[in-house]
Image: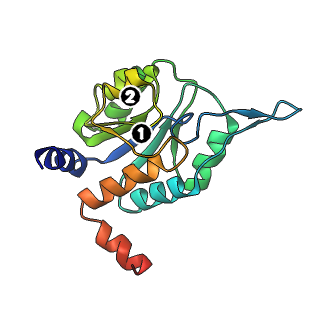
Amino acid sequence: MEEKNSLREKLVNIRLLILDVDGVLTDGRIVFDDEGRESKFFDVRDGHGLKMLMNFGIDVIFMTGRKSRAVDHRARDLGVKEVHQGIWDKLACYEDILRRHQLKDEEVAFIGDDIVDIPVLKRVGFAVAVADAEEETKAFVDYVTSKKGGRGAVREICTLILKAQGHWSQVAERYRF
């Protein structure tokens, strides 16, 4: 019971969710067609979870080590206004985001899947690894999702945040369940 209270206490403070992309918003596969065009697969329920979070005033930012136009398209589709691509020093980018948004570590959640994410995971108020993240990464998080990256992990966290912050009854009312 104490662990659940601790989890809720962390989630209640979240004002910003930062997401890695490959392996978190996608299942990590990168598909190239014969012309060299890149495709990624995004989960629609993850996107709906992000929209619900943003509707309750929680900002969302994408931060990824790769560069892909597909990420820009997905961000635009969801209304995510801030996207950082080609980021190899995620901690420096994170510190810049904190400064610009005037946030404290405890107001930020981050979802990652690989060792490049560890420096940020060690700093944020709520650190998450997806179920199929690297084992080394899982050692530095507050929560490991039951779902895999690109397969509902993001939605799982969005729901946890909305419930902890007392917004779930409004979601239920809106969708009449």
Q: Which residue is mark 1?
A: 18
Q: Which residue is mark 2?
A: 94
- In the structure shown, which secondary structural element does the residue marked by tag 2 occupy? helix
Q: Residue at x 31, y 53 (%)?
A: 161
- In the structure shown, which secondary structural element does the residue marked by tag 1 occupy? strand
Res 99 → quadrant? top left
Asked whether the viewer can see residue 115, the reply is yes
Q: Pinpoint residue 18: horizontal percent, then vertical percent.
A: 41, 39
Q: Pinpoint residue 27: horizontal percent, then vertical percent.
A: 58, 39
Res 137 → quadrant? top left
Disc 1/disc 2 C-alpha distance (Å): 9 Å
Res 166 → quadrant? bottom left
| Amino acid type shown at disc 1 | Ile
Asked whether the viewer can see residue 95, the reply is no
Q: Residue at x 63, y 42 (%)?
A: 72
Q: Pinpoint residue 101: horizontal percent, then vertical percent.
A: 34, 39
Residue 68 badge: none
Is residue 155 depicted above or below 139 in this figure? Answer: below
**Left or right: where does residue 56 sit relative to residue 84?**
left
Q: Are marks 1 and 2 in contact (CB under 8 Å)?
A: yes
**Left or right: where does residue 14 sit relative to residue 53?**
left
Choose mark 1 or mark 2, whichever is in front: 1
**Left or right: where does residue 1 sit relative to residue 55?**
left
